Amino acid sequence: MASRLIQNRQLSEDTWQVATDPTQAPAGANLLISLADWLAQPQAWLDHAGRAGVALQPTDDPVGLQPWLAQLALITVNFPAFTDGRGYSIARLLRERHGYAGQLRAVGDVFKDQLFYLSRVGFDAFLLREGEDAQDAISALDTFTEAYQVSVDRPEPLFRRRLG
Amino acid sequence: MYFYDEIDQRIVDERVAQFRDQTRRYLAGTLSEEDFRPHRLQNGLYIQRHAPMLRVAIPYGVLSSRQLRMLAQIARRYDRGFGHFTTRQNIQFNWPKLEDVPDILADLATVQMHAIQTSGNCIRNTTTDHFAGVAGDEQIDPRPYCELIRQWSTFHPEFAFLPRKFKIAVNGATHDRAATRVHDIGLDLVRDAQGAIGYRVLVGGGLGRTPLIGHVIREFLPEQHLLSYLDAVLRVYNRFGRRDNKYKARIKILVKELTPAKFRAAVEEEWAHLIDGPATLVPEELARIRSRIAVHDYQPSALTLADAAAQRSDDAAFLRWLQRNVIAHKVSGYACVTLSLKSTGVAPGDLGDSGLDAVAELADRYGFGELRVSHEQNLILPDVPVQHLGAVHTAAQALGLAQPNIGLITNIIACPGGDYCSLANARSIPVAQALQERFDNLDYQYDIGELDLNISGCMNACGHHHVGHIGILGVDKHGEEFYQVTIGGAQSATAALGRVIGPSLRQDEVPDAVERMIQRYLSLRDSEVERFVDVVQRLGIEPFKESVYGLKAHSESPAV
Ligand code: SF4
């Protein structure tokens, strides 16, 4: 199957696998773990995984991940429907408030028309839903050349940049 | 109006290209209807009963004659020759073709207009006083703040997919003409004891299915913190507003379920992280926006409206018009003229392409080429020199826009209703027309005095029926059109929600019911200054209920 993962504006292979039990998962692999599973035994996961990532749902509060953010290489945020905008706030909180610097990946009902907004709130990877034209989707990262607000990609709002 | 700079223009142009691509993919079948829908709605495009409907933004109701001419051209070229002004100070076209919409947007962009976020679950067009910048009772000009909010809300990346639509209104005058108490966020511009500008912030007001009056969550927010505070309110709403039931998804429900005190605490906690951050306003930006909002070259004179009346003391039609449709301007020697789009026989808020062009001409000749749209669905010439009022009256008469009915019963607010809107339970326009015919006699209207009559075709309340002194709501009873009547609603500072008088009525019963209530009012008022709504407040709804349903109404339960 063709790759549907966009990282750094390019199609990439997805090297992560979902895991639910550290004793069962292959040691040294890149493991993606739900928030509940992670919070149950964070140290076990850290000891076992090559790299660890956490999968968030729109109802999850990212503040719970704070103690481990520096050790996580990936956080995914699920969009069950693209019209569910909670993930946008989660992304900004992770980036702006909690200082998360690893990969932030949008997954779920993700396609071309969301990519520009998603990239502005701090997502740097996008797992497109099936059936999407990935090259066409990448072009949407450049839909707009300017934007008014404070955002993760441009922390100064336009009105401050206009001064310069 | 605010004049775009190169960046504002580029953003709007890029939006046109984006929508062209989305439309192309939809027509090619690579973007499904389900996925296209929220995107076209965020561009003001509905699929209606007969055809698509395109809602074009008129930011805070201010537009130029050049823009109005473009709207006329669009009505001619892409529609059936007319536009409909809405209660949110926007304009709607009812007959464009879907495949033409990218071209329409491109035409609009050439005059700094767009349809961005005029629908959908996002931050909508900000509204304000239709006399902003010219009203005599204005304390603080709301337009620069509205423009700040327009820019902040345009493609805000975090708040493009909210639980539900989100409406903000700003008021800066003594008399609230922006209805800040019935908006998701209402901002009253105020000064503190030191004279510094700030905002009183109200949250959780709204009409629709669950009409509520907003709660003050901050008595005084200092001027520079506007955007970070809005970010905090919206973030709390985006994260915690209900998404499981669209009828419970507005912020008013969140505020109510949490309680205003807890909602306020959540906002303050969020804001504590954002305060003094990069979204904090800088004085240069307010100065920049002010400099791009046209400041007109007024030539003050000593002429007053009383002088205008004295000069034409034998012209009864002019005097009536002067009394109802003209108010004093804050610059002496000028006046603000309302052109009534509420003539008998015309759907409220509708104007044809030649009318749009003619009004643009009036704005150029008797003003600075600027116009306003009121939420009462009329057009306003904001800067008419007093010595030209006679000429403007004559011109407006020739255009059929001089009905001296502002504030009177025939200045009906009505949504497009079942004739156009696919959400409607019932038609609005025929009811409005029947009432206008019934009360066509001007002497009768003047005798009745001030009365707001508002009609909505369904619970969505686009016609603001809850805040009408008389409100009429279309309801569906076993597949038939019925109308529920409320009385005692009011907008502005004394905002109140009307109460249902009894079982809903058939369409042909509505004019009689209204007339009977009016007759009862005329017999009950203690003087001519006591308005219909005052009598309802003094005596309650009982006498009116009885006038419509007779005495047995007391034992019946109100329907619907
Ligand atoms: S009130 Fe209802 S019928 Fe009227 S325009 Fe709004 S949605 Fe349509």
Image: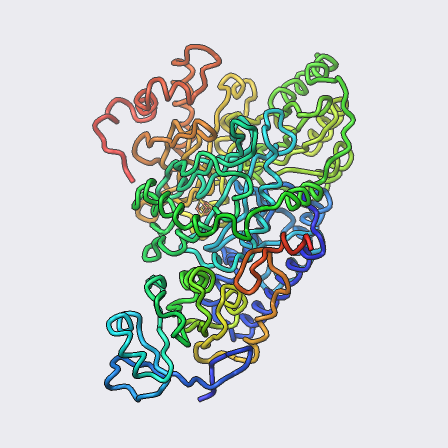
Q: What is the x, y in percent for residue B112? A: 68, 52
- Residue B354 sits in quarter: top right
The residue lying toward the viewer, choosing from B61 and A32, is A32
Q: What is the x, y in percent for residue A122? A: 49, 66
Q: Is residue B343 visible?
A: yes
In this rendering, the answer to whether B42 lies above or below B487 is below
In this rendering, the answer to whether B369 lies above or below B119 is above
Identify the residue shown where x is 47% and y is 87%. Answer: A2
Identify the residue shown where x is 37% and y is 38%. Answer: B212
The residue lying toward the viewer, choosing from B369 and B2, is B2
Q: Is residue A84 visible?
A: no
Q: What is the x, y in percent for residue B123? A: 50, 51
A130 left or right of B95? left
Identify the residue shown where x is 47% and y is 45%. Answer: B417
A95 left or right of B79? left
The residue lying toward the viewer, choosing from B407 and B236, is B236
Which quadrant is the N terminus of chain A positioned in?
bottom left
Q: What is the x, y in percent for residue B289? A: 66, 44
Which quadrant is the C terminus of chain A positioned in?
bottom right
In this rendering, the answer to whether A129 lies above or below A88 is below
